[in-house]
Amino acid sequence: MVDLSVKLGSLTLANPVMPASGTFAEGTSRVFDLDCLGAIVTKTITQDVREGVPPPRVAEFRDATLFSIGIPSKGSDYYIEQTVPFYRRYTPPLVASISANTIEEFGTLAAKIAVPGVAAIEANVSCPNLKKDGRAFGMDPEATYHVVKAMKEACGLPVWAKMTPNAGNVVEVALAAEEAGADALVVSNAILAMAIDVETFRPRVANVMGGLTGAATRPIMLRIAYQCVQAVKIPVIGCGGIGTAADALEFLLAGCRAVQVGTANFVSPTAMPRLIHDLTVYCERHGVSKLSDLIGAVRMHEPIKLQQKAAL
Amino acid sequence: MTSLQTDACAAENPASDNDARTTSGHCSNETRATGKVVPLCAHRGDTASAADPTCSRKPSIAENQCVVRSNEWVNPEYKHLVLSAPDLALTARAGQFFHLACPPSNDEVPYLRRPMSIYRVAPDNQRIEFLYKVQGVGTRGLAQLNRGDTLDALGPLGKGFDLPATTGAAHVLLLARGVGLATMAPLAQEAISAGAHVTALLSARSPSLVMSADYLRDAGADIVIVTDDDQTSDVVQVEHLIRRLHASRPITFATTCGSNRLLSMLQRVAAELRIPGQIALEQHMGCAIGACYACVRPFRKSAGSDELTYRRVCWDGPVFDLQETTSW
């Protein structure tokens, strides 16, 4: 039997697979048994009730999607009274994702939802659909530092900071989150993007800009995750275009300790249980008894010494 | 309640005679190319699952692997797709839909699935059917399906029509135009078997585009056809028709699909005559299981309210209260 378990600081997951925030809901439990998962990450909530941005909210490309949803939220009370009890029926640790308008509000909300049944809190400092031009806390190292610090001081739970690929230098933001006490990084949220319908002259999402996600983004997201792994000591959770075991293994080999599956859940809502099963198949095929042995196991190409060869 | 697929794994269950099967969280299909299906884990309670306590709860939504029986043009714009489907898919109700993994067509590859409302469910011969207008990347791909091909249909999904408990003289009005005809058809069957009288008022551009009249007539519905070509389909005339129908046999429930102008008229007439009703809506979707919130539309918080809120067409609908719906 292959051991798929991974450690994320104080948390041990049965396997490294969890949904990316916003791509998973109670309805998923009607498709497969959620106990299969390594962890459950819920859609980002805010303190207040929010409607999100107007439709159209989604556009499609060959291997990618452009979403602009704008974090509709039923609010923190609903989350505590309805969402948490629903997921307490399942064994995987529950990770709450939160967003707020100010640093203080991140702290207040973290304190409020640190209730029994919540195992960690993900700071969504990276949604591209909240502010004009897709700006987010996560684009600025100092703002990210203060958000994470406020959350760490407000609650005793592990805090994960979700990076944005839209920062000028993601590594600087990653280091700031680590310095502020983040327990893990999630790398990364969606790539700020836009599209225009040339027949109607209208932007293909009403918010003009949105987040590009899906398989096509994976090489960019893997690169950023790898850069973060190289820079920080805390665990990195890979996210971006992951839909198969091979995709997940790329991130694990690059040094990520776990992975989040996002848009692939829309293409096939059984993507995660299939991925988990296929990780076992892969390990058996490669004679690997512990999946965690593969974390960071990427092998560099041997350097080719051109001068020596020329001398021969 | 029809029993759900008891075990989704084709590897463990002999394939049914129609070859359709359900792929769910219980199954993995890693070696899809060779057709080998690897069970991920079995149900709790099965001997095979004793060692693996996960993956035990039965799915009520699945990626149904359906087999194409036929896929024919019914007129120059619409095709009729008949599929052999696993038992779980056969639990679909009127107004519900499936999220179809449409195949590529030419060099166009639909990345996301496409929602498609159910046209007919025939549990006795393991069939589900769709009637669709060929107009986009997804439906162009569907149009190329041939007999024997497999189509992955996620579902059944969404909240279907909710007919009021039948009283003695139930009279259900179906008001549909264009592609809405397909969505309304199975409602006639359900209403008639629940003891209601059904009048289907079908509107289309031309008589050749009125597709389900025979199906509805066979189901026992009264049929009224109005078309642009015959100059009988304008909203004023349709309103008069509805008022005459109501005068001769009071309408107890009014349903519609497919036309913004008919919706506005029906809302006004139904409010005046105090007839409750529902509408089936469509919207571009991402996940279709309530997770992504891409498919929202604005609704009144309650009938008559000016306060609007976004609701998910996939999960809160696609069938909604007639008076809470806003026209588009």
Image: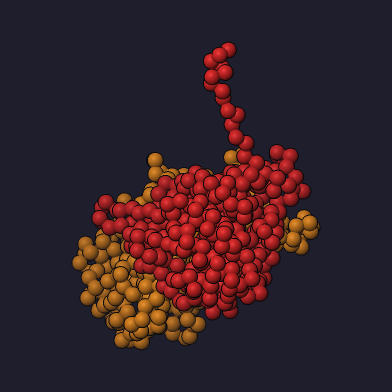
Residue A5 visible in the picture: yes
Q: Nearer the viewer, residue B70 or B6?
A: B6
Determine the residue positioned at 75% across, 45% down: A289
- Chain B shade in the render: orange
In the image, residue B122 sits, relative to residue A79, either above or below, namely: above
In this view, A38 is above or below A76: above
- Figure quadrant of the C terminus of chain A: top right
Q: Could you tell me which residue is drawn at 62 percent across and 36 percent down?
A: A299
A245 and B223: which is toward the camera: A245
Residue B68 in the image, given as x and y percentages of width and height: 50, 49
Foreground pick, A107 / A38: A107
Q: Identify the residue at image location x=46%, y=51%.
A: A169
Horizontal and vertical percent position of residue B307: 36, 81
Chain A drawn colour: red
Q: Is residue A233 left or right of residue A222?
A: right
Residue B21 percent coordinates (x, y)? 60, 53
Relative to B134, residue B297 above or below: below
